[in-house]
Amino acid sequence: MARDIEEIKDRIAGCLWGQAIGDALGLGTEFMSRDEVLHNYPDGLLEYSQIVQDFHRERWNQGDWTDDTDMMLCIARAIIADKAIKSKTVAHNFKEWFRGIPMGIGQLTYTVLGLYDYESDPEKAAEIVWDSMYGRNNAANGGVMRTSVVGLWNENAAGNAERICRLTHADPRCIGSSVVISEIINSLVWHGRELSFEDLCRIGYQYDERIGMYIIAGKVGQLEDLKLDDEQTMGYTLKTMGCAIWCLFHVNSFKEGMLKVVNAGGDADTNAAVTCAVLGAKYGKKGIPEYYMQNLKRKDEYEEMIRQLTDILIEKFM
Ligand SMILES: [Mg+2]
């Protein structure tokens, strides 16, 4: 049991820094095939300053995070304001973000948040879009990409992850993968314990049996088996979850996992945001090379958010 306060603080910070760092570096290969990654980065993408400034990427500065962390911040700021996870505040923050310039926003999230009365019943808005536009068959990774911070709240991680996912994503695979990731983080941060393969299967199967296959893929085989750069399936929530689980079980450091996922291409910013949040919770801030924190574009405001949120979490749960 890791009840040591400094260790818990280090893991909270590691998780939050990991989210933004993975997102910011992953942007460098987002939507690329593995061949395109090799073409653009013959020696691998290692640093923000290497990120190619093509049509997709030039909208961001090198070292900026994208929508994944923007939406995670909507949740984090709601927690800081309410000292609780209130759906209403989170949904309001999502809508405010949408009204600005929501760069990188996914298609399903865009449609849901764009409904004019979204805030009056967000879960219903999500359900209607999933049902009417996608025939109840869209499991994009827009819920799982922002769920890390929900796992830091040390009370009902599964219920909260489900509730926050439902604000935009109704598919049981979206909900189940969000719960799995938040539970992994919650256990690492507050109990110093890595959930086992059996634990993960037990959690995942409660939501959708298709989740099981990707937990197995995370346990056995190679990262390449997930085919993260496959054009047809690259935004699939179970691929994102599977790649974070694969790294949890197979890599020996934060940096090793991050670089593997980033250089695999596909929906790399989201895959790396989730993976690095998990690895940050596992190895702590002390396991993250300084370069990646120091060179984040909006480092100072992010650091301040981490400080405020950590104070609230420690006060409430220690
Ligand atoms: Mg993104």
Image (cartoon, rainbow, N blue to C red):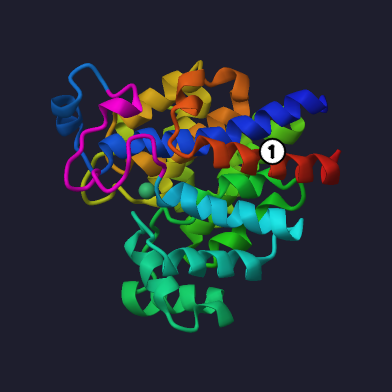
Up-down relation of residue 11 to residue 211 (above or below): above
Q: Quadrant of residue 192?
A: top right
Q: Quadrant of residue 5?
A: top right
Q: Amino acid at mark 1?
A: Arg
84 lies left or right of 195: right
Where residue 132 sits: x, y (%)? Answer: 36, 80
Residue drawn at x 55%, y 51% as measured from the top left: 73
Tell which of 210 and 15 is nearer to you.
Answer: 15
Residue drawn at x 56%, y 50% as measured from the top left: 147
Please tell me whether mark 1 sits on a helix, a strand or a loop.
Answer: helix
Quarter of the image with the C terminus is: top right
Residue drawn at x 21%, y 34% as measured from the top left: 52
Residue at mark 1: 307
Where residue 162 sits: x, y (%)? Answer: 60, 59
Where residue 135 sits: x, y (%)? Answer: 34, 74
171 lies left or right of 91: left
Tell which of 268 and 193 is nearer to you.
Answer: 268
143 lies left or right of 150: left
Residue drawn at x 30%, y 27% as measured from the top left: 49
Label 1: few (<14), some (14–19) or many (≥20) C-alpha neighbours in 10 Å: some
Query: Which stretch appears magenta?
Result: 45-65
Up-down relation of residue 299 to residue 183 (above or below): above
